[in-house]
Image (cartoon, helix red, strand yellow):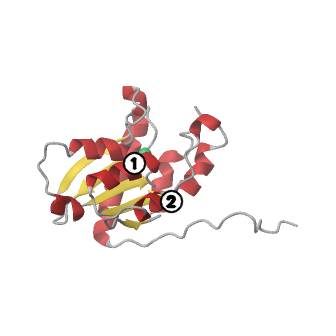
Amino acid sequence: MNLPDSSLPALPEETTLDERDGRYLRKAIVWSHAARRRGNRPFGSVIVSAAGEVLAEAANSNAETGDCTAHAEVNALRALAGRGLTREELAGATLYASGEPCVMCAGAIFWSNIGRVVFGIDAQRLRVFRGERQDQRDAELSCRDVFRASPHPIECIGPALIDEAAAAHDGAWKT
Ligand SMILES: [Zn+2]
């Protein structure tokens, strides 16, 4: 008899996005495929102003650069450097991430003053793709835990478009 294992935590429920959030999250997912094609972990990120201007977009570039901090979100945030955005403009911006931001990226988002995050596949579902290899495991602290500790509000929406965001991870963590 295969009874469901009640000791496993329930997976987070998918959020339904409006047209605008869906459009930009799909853009981040396109970057996750670009990252994979170039030999990196399949993650992408896009930062969009309150007015809907794409301020930055980036792929993960860990493998290309040998830089362990070159996650898509950090790469996108670094692309904002020198743009002269005000704190208010940043607070009104949204960072889209194809996968739930890790602890490092959540910290970087906090320091950026960006006020809103929308992500695709959640960390729990990503762990299924990563498998049991110790060198592929992430820290089990959710981005929401980091954002909750922030003195300024950081709205966090996700997981969303899970199947679309998951596609780039299929078979990507075997090596
Ligand atoms: Zn990260």
Residue 116 in percent (x, y) is at 31, 64
Please tell me whether mark 1 or mark 2 is closer to you in this view. 1
Q: Is residue 30 visible?
A: no
Outermost residue to the left: 84
Of the numbered discs 1 and 2, the one sitting upstream in the chain is 1
Residue receiving disc 1: 105
**In screen coordinates, is 47 left or right of 105?**
left
Q: Quadrant of the N terminus?
A: bottom right
- Tag 1: residue type? Cys
Q: Residues within 10 Å of mark 1 (few under 14, many from 20)?
A: many
* Quarter of the image that includes the C terminus: top right
SS class of the residue under badge 1? helix
In-image side of 59 versus 79 (left or right) = right
> Residue 83, how many percent across, how many down?
13, 47
Q: Which mark is residue 163?
A: 2
Q: Is residue 121 above or below residue 71?
A: below
Q: Which residue is located at x 47 percent, y 47 percent? A: 168
Give the amino acid type for the residue marked by disc 2 in the picture.
Asp
- Disc 1 under 8 Å from ligand 1? The reply is yes
Which numbered disc covers residue 82? Answer: none
Residue found 62% across the figure and 50% down from its top: 128
